Amino acid sequence: MFLQVLMNWRDQQCLRFLWRNEESNRSPDVYVTKVMTFGATCSPSCAQYVKNHNAQRFQDKFPRAVEAIIREHYVDNMLSSVETEDEAIKLAELKANPGEESLSEMGTEKVLGLWWCTAADTFTFKVSSMINVDLLQGYIVPTKMHILSTLMTIYDPHGLLANFLMFLKILFQEIWRSGINWTNPLRANSGRNGKYGYASENGYAAVAYLRFEEDGEVECALVGRSHQLKPTKQFFWTDARNVLCWLNSDHWRYNQFVAIRISEILELTEVNEWNWIPTKLNVADDATKWQKLPDFSPASRWFSVPQFLWEAKEEWPVAVSSFNYTAEEKRPNVLHHSVKRVLFRDSCITETEARTMSSSLYGLSPFLDEEGLLRMKGRIDACEDVDDCMKRPILLPKCHPVTDLIISSVHQHFCHMNHQTTLNQIRSRFYVSQLPSAYKRVRARWQHCKIRQAKPVAPEMSALPPARLKAFCRPFSYVGIDYFGPMHVVVGRRTEKRWGVLITCLTVRAIYLEVAASQPTNAFSPSETSSPGEVPLWR
């Protein structure tokens, strides 16, 4: 399709290439591509535009052909569907070239990677002709390379052969784990033989069927993949009772793997659409649990639809009303209650109990509002400038996860600063006993607050060197020397730089000053600049 679209001469310069026809001794020739290429990013969209533009030129003369070209094409493949045979014959007569085959002469064609038998209206699957026939018939022991090559040559985007390809993929996984080389023949125990236990051990599969019922007649068909249109009524079956338990409970009670997948299921389906089915009737098990080779005959239950779908709904498997809740996948340390029931749940306080004199909330005049929340009566009900939450704040316990979450939210809103403002904001809606201490406890958990409140710790002082501890020795036996300056001095008619030398006795901390002409160590010699006996020798 791309090679049939001619490019503008200005755009042809963008697709230059060099060619020297295997003659390395001469300079290469420069060519340009006049038509669209498969490597250009713009080729698909430009080719679609050209196709539709050319079709619209014949809108008045061939309206049905224009509709088929614009709306019933995928790239260069035409996929049309009609209700009657007469419409199909008319559609087949809209051919561009007189030499094309007629509808009766059409055989198997490749459409979007699948082989479609137009006469029988069925999909067929072919194995690449490059694979050895003796290998397919079992005369040659296959290698790991042969298994992967055969698997990758089968293109099944609709999942029609999932019961077979799943078996082949898991078999290849077992061969890979065995550590055998790519070219070595497979051993008898290279892959796992026999029955696979559960789908969760190796993979999972699902199969969908479409059921029509009109005027008492029922028709069922295998659906390869999901559709955009939602059916009027949909049903889901599973033989896993624990899955039904997860769907009918709070899925956030479970670990992350289970919770995320259950939430995705509930976003697309309803809980009442899920039903239980015995394992013997579960068709999806044909893709994950094998007792024999997959059945490819049209009469197999994978293609012919489970028997109970052909019957009336009253004859379908009975749904399970009770579930055995499992604790294996539960998430530890997670609240399983709503906010309404969780406040003061440890003491199970009611409005009557809270009004008794022995209750710690008696002085707050508590009451339950219409939502079942415990609130405190105040004295500002007549004030019109504040909302009801400030007039009757919600009572919260001091040490509770819900209280900590509320405090953390307000504290984060004020960017971990303005602590008194944060407390006032919390008090405008909630009453928390000993709120400052609760706020301090929550702040201590934030790493940002820990860093801001951290104080530098002074390092531990090391032990004094032996020179500092020589008490019975002459002064300046052990000294420290440092320079300062420079200072400008006049020598004759010129000005020179001099540096002061600060000599400190390490024992008695006495100080002696000297003058140096330069900063190198060898430029200062006490024996040359001092008189004998004025400055002792030092080490």
Image: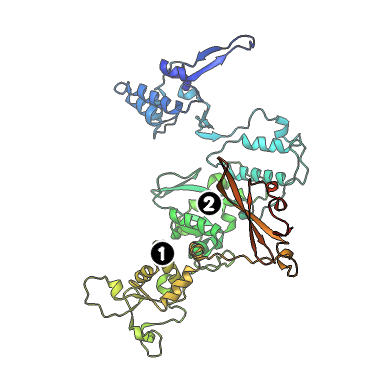
Q: Are marks 1 and 2 in contact (CB under 8 Å)?
A: no
Foreground mark, 1 or 2, reads 1
- Count the marks: 2
Q: Secondary structure at mark 2?
A: helix
Vertical arrangement, residue 463 with respect to residue 68, above or below: below
**Residue 55 position in % (x across, y down):** 36, 23
Q: Residue furthest bottom?
A: 357
| Residue drawn at point x = 31 percent, y = 75 percent | 370
Q: Between 392 and 208, which is closer to the camera in this rendering?
A: 392
The amino acid beneath tag 1 is Met
Q: Nearer the viewer, residue 242 or 538?
A: 538
Residue receiving disc 1: 417
Q: Is residue 520 left or right of residue 331?
A: right
Q: CA distance from mark 1 to mark 2?
A: 68 Å
- Indicate which disc residue 307 carries: 2
Residue 165, percent from left and from top: 62, 42
x 41%, y 29%: residue: 88
Front residue of 160 and 449: 449
In which quadrant will I find the C terminus? Answer: bottom right
Q: Dividing the picture into quarters, in which one does residue 85 lie?
A: top left
Q: Amino acid at mark 2?
A: Gln
- Work out whether 273 lies above or below 76: below
Colouring style: rainbow
Q: Kindly identify which numbered label has been placed on residue 87.
A: none
SS under mark 1: loop
In the image, is 309 to the left or to the right of 461?
A: left
